[in-house]
């Protein structure tokens, strides 16, 4: 007979197998989502939105300045003519 020792070892082996399988799936899924072969920069996304007409020129210029400015310092807002508000 198997006895208690055999059942305990079989249960632990089954838990280790399923745990390793789940870990492998999660690891591979996480790695594939992080390894984007063609990462897009924020400026490119902003330019695409402007080209599609989702944002106007003033909003495009304002957001572009924010992206290109130093962190922690927000540039002044401009109206459609480029003057500060």
Image: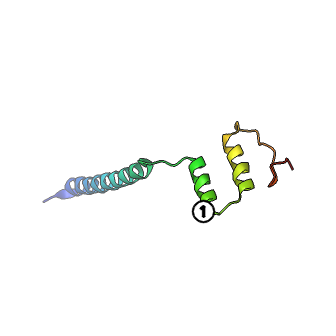
Q: Is residue 72 placed above or below 2 in the rendered structure?
A: above
Q: Outermost residue toward the top?
A: 70
Q: Residue furthest front?
A: 81
Please give left or right for residue 52 compared with residue 5 in the image: right
Q: Judge the density around disc 1: few (<14), some (14-19), many (≥20) Cα neighbours within 10 Å.
A: few
List the single residue furthest toward the left.
1
Q: Is 6 in front, or is 78?
A: 78
Horizontal relation, residue 72 to residue 79: left or right: left
Q: Is residue 43 left or right of residue 11?
A: right
Q: Position of residue 48 (x, y in %)?
A: 58, 56
Q: Nearer the viewer, residue 24 or 80?
A: 80
Residue at (76%, 39%) from the top-left corner?
Answer: 73
Residue 2 quadrant = bottom left
| Residue depicted at x 71% and y 55% | 57
Q: How many marks?
A: 1
Residue occupying image coordinates x 35% and y 51%: 28
**Residue 40 placed where, x, y %?**
51, 49
Where residue 6 appears, as percent x and y from the top left, is 19, 55
- Locate residue 62, reporting x and y percent: 73, 49
Q: Secondary structure at mark 1?
A: helix
Colouring scheme applied when the structure was drawn: rainbow
The residue tagged 1 is: 52
| Image quadrant occupied by the N terminus | bottom left
Residue 66 relative to residue 17: left or right: right
Residue at horizontal 39 percent and vertical 48 percent from the top:
31
């Amino acid at each position: 007979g198997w006895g208690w020792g055999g059942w305990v070892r079989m249960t632990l082996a089954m838990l280790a197998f399923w745990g390793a399988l789940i870990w492998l799936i999660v690891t591979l899924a996480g790695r594939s989502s992080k390894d984007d072969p063609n990462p897009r920069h924020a400026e490119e996304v902003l330019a695409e939105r402007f080209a599609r007409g989702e944002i106007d020129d003033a909003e495009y210029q304002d957001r572009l300045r924010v992206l290109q400015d130093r962190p922690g310092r927000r540039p002044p807002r401009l109206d459609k003519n480029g003057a500060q508000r």
